[in-house]
């Protein structure tokens, strides 16, 4: 079983303070970094992920929450997402796990964390449990929390032909009037990705929205058209 404190210690020991300062400035992160490059972080995590064997959903969720909530440096948050995405947890990615993912999104509250959670965790729940997850994402699309709304828009960016167009348009149209860069970029990104699958539909939808669609969203959406 994974030893969380040992993992924290290894992350700290492997860091580079100079890189850490650069990373924190680049990401505009309130939480400091240890200064690990992404390949080094993956190598360090590999044996821990191989040893990770939660006994059940509750054990897995407790491990994820404990490591996430106790994080003092951003690499610990990245490591937590890797634990949450672990192969042993695939069967637990469903509506019953959305409470955990909501917690990660709201407390993560920055694009590097939220985008991974949205695509690889919330998106997996949607594919596995569409009937129960879709109403929750519709609620998130109008939530007071910006990052939950972003999640509702981008959670399908890797779904290809399995994308639920009704859910996407619902989430987009609830957020068209939001002036936030993060929502406008999300809308454009979601449409740009779907244009790889159905460019004619995206072109028609962009035209339909007209001036309601921000310039940023329109430019992003049109990159593959």
Image (cartoon, rainbow, N blue to C red):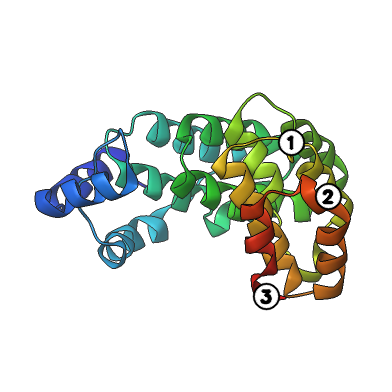
Crowdedness of circle 1 by 10 Å Cα count: few (<14), some, many (20+)? Answer: many
Position of 64 compared to 56: left or right? left
Name the spot of residue 50 as percent of width and height, x first.
40, 61
- Which badge, 2 or 1, is on the more N-terminal residue? 1
2 and 3 marks in contact (CB < 8 Å): no
Q: Is residue 197 visible from the viewing direction of this image?
A: yes
* Secondary structure of residue under mark 2: helix
Circles 2 and 1, Cβ within 8 Å, touching? The answer is: no
> Which residue matches tag 2?
169
Question: Picture coordinates of residue 172 (x, y %)?
Answer: 76, 45
Residue at horizontal 68 percent and vertical 65 percent from the top: 192
Q: Quadrant of residue 199?
A: bottom right
Circle 3 SS class:
helix
Residue 224 image label? 3
Residue lying at 58% horizontally and 37% vertically, measured from the top left:
180
Name the residue beneath numbered marker 1: 141
Distance between mark 2 and mark 1 Cα atoms: 11 Å
The CA distance from mark 2 to mark 3 is: 19 Å
Count how many numbered circles sit on residues in the image: 3
The percent position of residue 213, horizontal first and vertical second, equals 74, 49
- Which image quarter is the C terminus in? bottom right
């Amino acid at each position: 079983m994974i030893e969380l404190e040992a993992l924290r210690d290894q992350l700290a020991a492997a860091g580079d303070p100079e890189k850490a300062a650069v990373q924190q400035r680049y990401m505009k992160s309130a939480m400091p970094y240890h200064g690990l490059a992404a390949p080094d972080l993956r190598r360090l995590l590999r044996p821990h992920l191989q040893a990770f064997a939660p006994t059940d959903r509750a054990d897995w969720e407790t491990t994820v929450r404990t490591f996430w909530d106790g994080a003092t440096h951003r690499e610990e948050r990245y490591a937590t997402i890797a634990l949450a995405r672990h192969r042993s947890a695939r069967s637990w990615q469903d509506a019953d796990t959305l409470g955990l993912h909501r917690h990660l999104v709201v407390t993560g509250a920055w694009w590097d964390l939220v985008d991974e959670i949205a695509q690889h965790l919330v998106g997996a729940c949607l594919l596995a449990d569409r009937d129960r997850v879709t109403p929750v994402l519709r609620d998130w699309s109008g939530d007071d929390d910006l990052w939950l709304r972003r999640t509702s828009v981008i959670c399908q960016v890797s779904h290809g032909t399995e994308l639920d167009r009704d859910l996407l348009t619902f989430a987009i149209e609830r957020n068209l009037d939001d002036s936030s860069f993060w929502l406008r970029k999300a809308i454009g990104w979601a449409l740009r990705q779907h244009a790889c699958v159905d460019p004619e539909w995206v072109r028609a939808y962009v035209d339909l929205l007209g001036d309601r669609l921000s310039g940023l969203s329109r430019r992003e959406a049109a990159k593959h058209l």
